């Protein structure tokens, strides 16, 4: 099964980890683009780490927590608070490490402070291969705006904390999920070793060697040039002035000029910086050969102005989008976020095998748009009563024209068929995993590494558990009230804040 990078080309913006919310260089407005490129030799440059974002902080009462709240997550104060799913195993272990380092953290942070972290859990957390010395890493990135946004974060605290902790190795024992067959999930205590680090710095002299004089000169000349289409309409505008103009009659020409700036000027400048990226190697990389089949470069570089805190990143979006989609391809077909209920779209868009079973089952209730996750809450809110029980009863009453035994049988049949599809997909993956190959434009061949295979098998095992648990719940259902609790639990929990 051979794939090419073009197969997976996408326009999505990568905003994971330490660069959360940071724009790509080419996406900056033209004035910011020019200002940043002209002073790039003065900027601070670090390698973009390819782990998972987390923060650690002290709340107003001085209690230490970890969270991913910039993505809507809640704060975790204890290791036992984390969900018992494999996707949280790394965060849970990192939380345990931060608990052990609490004494150091308390010496530096004050109530309300928070630090942005990157968790490098395992040799290959995502695309880039790490794994040096068989350690896991917590990278201290930057101070974040704390609970009091009026207080400017003191970035010196990051260096102070790193100096305090030094090269100490923290050993923790936490419970992890694993599987060897994609069927049985094993929950067992595992000992892991961790170190605190910072992002690798890109030497300033290497950045300063990159010369944009010719490209910047051509871009500025183009911006100063008179725009012919505007002139035809009796408007005396340069290309730069056209970009600022908002008149409808020049909308098409603005797009033409914007596309030309991107393709003829911005991207060639970015390409020169891509050469700089290709020279960098992560200091946390393990022994050569251990990451066979994994991407051997870095993800990118984050540039920041130490005075203004302005930042941008350089990432080969085509390559990283391609590898990311490739690594997740098998998993997306099993269980993924439901983005559409359109039967003509690929099953990955419909939530994979698990999501498709859910969509088909909910459709049987005949509640318009209830199968669409973005609309389901609004649908259920139409039936909202004084409490959860009243709401479920109102939904149940609306279904009185349906025959419960027939609907229950159909849902069971859907989940049994989904289970069979999952078994077939698992056997296909096991026999064909060696054939998953992605050919990058730079000539490198990406394969499913040992870690990606393990994560894919875990996705199969967790999907199997989800199907079995739902099927079991459906079989025990005595009426529509029970089925509504099964298939609209999330919406009801949100509506009544977990009220039972």
Image (cartoon, rainbow, N blue to C red):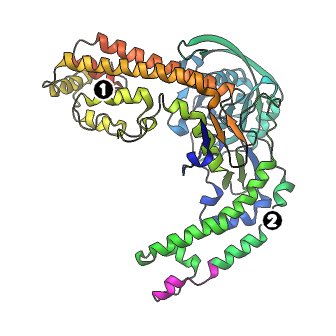
Indicate which disc residue 211 carries: 2
Q: Is residue 468 left or right of residue 124?
A: left
- Using the image as rendered, state which of residue 384 and residue 409 is in the foreground: 409
Res. 68 in view = no
Q: Is residue 223 left or right of residue 356?
A: right
Residue under pointer 1: 361
Position in image of residue 77 (x %, y %): 57, 23
Structural crowding at the residue carrying mark 1, measured as other residues with C-alpha within 10 Å and reported as few (<14), some (14–19) or many (≥20)? many
Residue located 59% across and 70% down the image: 260
Res. 40 in view = yes
Structural crowding at the residue carrying mark 2, measured as other residues with C-alpha within 10 Å and reported as few (<14), some (14–19) or many (≥20)? some
- Using the image as rendered, state which of residue 19 and residue 324 is in the foreground: 324
- Using the image as rendered, state which of residue 77 and residue 73 is in the foreground: 73
Q: Is residue 137 above or below residue 445?
A: above
- Using the image as rendered, state which of residue 464 and residue 378 is in the foreground: 464
Residue located 18% across and 26% down the image: 394
Q: Is residue 114 above or below residue 463?
A: below
Q: Which portion, as a residue range, is magenta?
A: 223-234
Q: Is residue 149 left or right of residue 294?
A: left
In which quadrant will I find the N terminus? top right
Quadrant in the picture for residue 270: bottom right
Q: CA distance from mark 2 to mark 1?
A: 60 Å
């Amino acid at each position: 099964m051979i794939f090419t990078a073009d197969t997976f080309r996408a326009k999505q913006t990568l905003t994971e980890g330490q660069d959360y919310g940071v724009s790509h260089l080419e996406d900056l407005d033209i004035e910011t683009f020019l200002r940043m490129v002209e002073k790039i030799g003065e900027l601070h440059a670090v390698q973009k780490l390819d782990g998972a974002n987390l923060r650690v902080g002290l709340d107003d009462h001085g209690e230490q927590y970890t969270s991913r709240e910039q993505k809507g997550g809640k704060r975790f104060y204890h290791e036992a608070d984390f969900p018992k799913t494999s996707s949280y195993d790394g965060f849970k272990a990192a939380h345990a490490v931060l608990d052990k380092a609490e004494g150091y953290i308390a010496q530096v942070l004050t109530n309300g402070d928070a630090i942005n972290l990157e968790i490098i859990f395992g040799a290959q957390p995502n695309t880039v291969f790490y794994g040096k010395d068989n350690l896991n890493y917590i990278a201290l990135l930057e101070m974040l705006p704390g609970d009091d946004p009026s207080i400017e974060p003191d970035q010196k605290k990051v260096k102070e904390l790193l100096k305090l902790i030094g090269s100490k190795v923290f050993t923790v024992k936490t419970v992890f999920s694993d599987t060897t067959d994609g069927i049985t999930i094993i929950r067992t205590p595992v000992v892991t070793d961790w170190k605190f680090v910072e992002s690798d710095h890109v030497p300033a002299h290497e950045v300063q060697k990159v010369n944009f004089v010719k490209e910047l000169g051509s871009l500025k000349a183009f911006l100063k040039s008179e725009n012919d289409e505007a002139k035809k309409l009796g408007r005396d505008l340069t290309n730069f002035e056209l970009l600022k103009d908002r008149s409808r009659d020049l909308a098409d020409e603005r797009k033409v000029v914007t596309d030309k700036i991107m393709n003829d000027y911005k991207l060639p400048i970015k390409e020169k910086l891509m050469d700089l990226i290709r020279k960098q190697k992560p200091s946390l990389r393990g022994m050569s050969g251990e990451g066979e089949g994994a991407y051997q470069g870095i993800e990118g570089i984050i540039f920041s102005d130490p005075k203004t805190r302005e930042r941008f990143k350089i990432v080969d979006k085509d390559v990283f989008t391609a590898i990311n989609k490739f690594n997740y391809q098998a998993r997306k077909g099993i269980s993924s976020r439901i983005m559409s209920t359109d039967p003509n779209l690929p099953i990955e868009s419909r939530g994979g095998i698990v999501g498709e079973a859910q969509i088909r089952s909910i459709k049987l209730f005949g509640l318009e748009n209830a199968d669409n996750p973005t609309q389901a809450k609004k649908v259920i809110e139409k039936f909202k009563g004084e409490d959860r029980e009243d709401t479920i009863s109102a939904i149940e009453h609306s279904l009185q024209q349906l025959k419960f035994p027939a609907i229950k049988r159909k849902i069971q049949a859907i989940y049994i068929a989904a289970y069979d599809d999952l078994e077939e997909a698992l056997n296909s993956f096991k026999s064909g995993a060696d054939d998953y190959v992605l050919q990058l434009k730079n000539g490198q061949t990406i394969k499913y590494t040992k870690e990606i295979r393990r994560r894919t098998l875990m996705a199969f095992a967790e999907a199997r558990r989800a199907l079995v648990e739902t099927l079991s719940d459906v079989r025990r259902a005595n009426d529509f009230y029970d089925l509504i609790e099964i298939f609209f639990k999330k919406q009801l929990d949100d509506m009544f804040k977990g009220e039972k």
